[in-house]
Structures are given as structure tokens and as C-alpha cells.
Amino acid sequence: MPDVALRGFRCQGFPCVGRDDTRTSVSTKSIIIVSGMIAADPGQGGAVWAVLQYLLGLERLGHEVLFIEPIRAASLRPAGAPLAASENARYFRRVMAEHGLGQRSSLWLSGTGESVGLSVGRLREASGRAGVLFNLSGMLAFGDLGGQIPIRVYVDLDPAFNQLWSATQGIDMRFGGHTHFVTVGLAIGDADCLVPDCGRTWIRTLQPVVLQHWPPAGALCHDALTTVANWRGYGSIEHGGVTYGQKAHSLRPLFGLPRRTPEKFRLALAIHPDETRDLAALAENGWELVDPALVTGTPSDYRDFVAGSRAEFGVAKSGYVASRCGWFSDRSACYLASGRPVIAQDTGFSRHLPTGRGLFRFTDADGVLAALDSLRSDYAGHRRAARGIAEDHFDSDKVLGRLLDEVGA
């Protein structure tokens, strides 16, 4: 599909919101509980922001927002540490305090009455009065907590993989017990998307960005194309003759890219040192690697890394590409909000978002090089266009306000 200009764009599959939409809230305020992961794997600043966008965005709409993170004893660091003295708890307290959520959040040791922050008793009382639960990736397992909330929304942040694990491998993805199902796979339900619906109706949504926390960036700290990524997140899936793989499988065909352009590529890449062959290939071809734990370990460090970059080179998991699920990264949305252009591997999102100014899609190395040529010709214009896309399409006021309407809140 050719790139399209901003002016001629029309949304498909979900309501289109332009800059003339000034709605900032839904009519009825609720107690809203959000469950997600912040501290189970401390030091993941980008993953934290994926949760914070919901917490801070719903709060902006005037709702009373509470956060629950269930954590298993096996996730506590160091091993065997009590919850309150763990590295997880320290990270949780710091993040919540920095964003004004310290009195409205709880790190709950699953299956016990032990928590950091809000007590389990307070959580049970609040869940009895809450109107909506946003359960990000099904983090909260329903028991005596959350199951009585009238609107229980499963938010799928890993489209294709969650559905395939459920439909083809029989893995319990905790879909049960929810009243609504939301996915960031913008193309799920399209004719050429291979993702099974698992017998559910999926509401498609963009990822929200709280724009006040992501203002247009200033000076460059990294005069390079950057991204933040895991080389592998988990195993691949084989189904119907198709391999649904990881970012390793997407980036390998592009190993020679830095040799074809004067632009620098700097990746905050979590890759195991045993991946010796891939590490050697990355080094030989001129990729610069930095440790994400050092440069993006906290939400503020992550924001600084994104804002200080020239643009994003966004590689998708090969499973997103193969399935044509329309996934678009919350990370890429943050680059756009910062006024940093994005060159993103196409997963089907280009049917649903404007490309060609500020946001480019690619399917191969030639597509990346063409986007780089365009960036060099009018970088300032592409910066403005990137911010405009964030304002038009990712503004949390619009995305979350519309989503609350969709689920009947």
C-alpha cells in the first residue's frame, strides 16, 4: 500500500478523532481500577510508561483511579526477600511517588494479605465500589478481588500472540470473566489479518499518550535513530505453516542497513550475551548497542532517551508482521509525541494511521533508506508532523474518553 498524505487520511475500523475534537471527559465519573505490571521486572522504564498512560490519562478525565499490581513470590528480588524489603517494592514506591500515585496504588503479593501501598482490605472495599476495571494483559486473576466490578475490560497489549496462545495451544490467557475485550491490534478483524478472535468481539484502540508528560523535545542527545527493544521476549509460535517470531527474526534481514547510509543506528537492546553470532553481526555492520538497564531503566530515563533521539527506527516482532495484526508501539507513540519522527516496520497499521510525513512505514531496507532521504530533506517539517499525529490520534483524553464510551462506562 502506498504511503498517504496526512490531509487525505480517513480512519478505518475505529472512530477518527481530529484536532477539532475538544472532548476531554466522559459525562459520568467513576472509580476505575487499573491492573498491570510495573515492578515484577523492575528497571523497564518503557513498560512502566505503557501502564502510566492509562493511570494518568484516566485521572486527567476526572476519575478516581486506583492501581493494583499482583506479584508472585517467585518474582521478588533478591530471591526469598520479603515483599516490603524487596527491590520490586523499592522500584514500585519510587515510580508511584514520582507520579503522585503513592496513596492510590498497591503492590500485592498474590494469594496473601500482604501488600505495599494500599492494603488488601482497602482494595477489596474499593473494588466493591468501582465501576470499571482495566485489566492490562490480564494481570489480575479474578478471585475475591475485581470480579464484582460491573465493567471488566481485558486490554490486549500483545496482539496475535495472546490470541494464538489461547486458540492454538489452549493456554489460559485469563480472557474469562471479562465483559469487554480491547486490543491494540488495529487490524484484528480485517480480512487479511490472521489473528483468531477466540470467539470474542474485540474493540480496537490506539495506545494513549498523556501529552502533558510528553512535550515536544528540545536538543538532540543522540544524533542517531534509536529504539528500545528485547531481542527475544519469549518463544515463537508455529501455526498453519506460519512462524510468529520475535524481533530477532525481524532485524536479521536488516543487518546490513547501517552500511548503506551515513545515519547512525543506536539500539537500547536487551540481548543475552550468549547470542554471540547475532552480536558479532550487529557489531560488524555498524549497529551501536547500549544497555537499556542503564539508559531507560526508569520512566524519566526512558523519556529522556526517546526525546533526545533524532528519530525512531521501530522494528516489530515478526509475529506482528506475519499476522498483519496492525500493532503500533506505545513506544513509537511516545516518539511521535516528542516530535521525533518514526520509521516503523509495517504490521498493517498503515491502513489506520497516516504515513509519509512524521511517520513512515517500511517493509524492507529500501523503505528505511527512502524514509531517511525524506527526513534529511525536511527534518523540521517531519518533527511538526510527528507531533501532529500524536495530538490527532494518541492524545489520552481522546483515546481513553472514546474507549470508556465504547465499553459503556
Image (cartoon, rainbow, N blue to C red):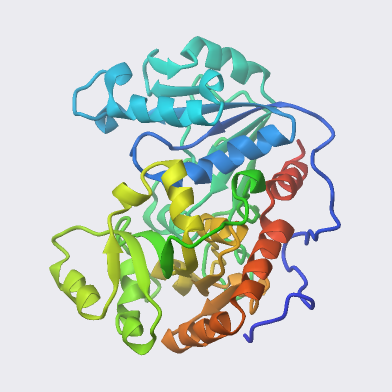
Q: Residue 406 location, x and y as percent?
A: 75, 46
How far from the left and from the top, in percent, is residue 151? Answer: 67, 33
Which residue is situated farthest in the top direction here?
121
Q: Is residue 342 above or below residue 269?
A: below
Q: Can residue 175 be seen?
A: no
Q: In the image, what residue occupies the spot 20% across and 29% down?
A: 78
**Depth order, front residue of 221/404:** 221
Q: Residue 132, image x and y in percent? A: 67, 31
Residue at the location (42% across, 85% down)? Answer: 365
Q: Quadrant of residue 384?
A: bottom right
How many labels sit on residues? 0
State left or right for residue 126 relative to residue 38.
Answer: right
* Residue 127 shows up from this direction: yes
Image quarter where the N terminus lies is bottom right
**Front in this rendered view, residue 155 or 37:** 37
Residue at 56% in and 79% down? 375
Residue 168 position (above or below residue 381) = above
The quadrant of the image that shows the C terminus is top right
Pick the residue in front: 127 or 221: 221
Position of residue 49 measured from the top left corner of the image (x, y, whole percent): 50, 44
Q: Is residue 334 left or right of residue 161?
A: right
In the drawing, does residue 27 fall left or right of residue 83? right
Which quadrant would residue 185 be assigned to in this image?
bottom right
Q: Residue furthest front?
A: 219
Q: Give the vertical position of 288 relative to 260 (above or below).
A: above
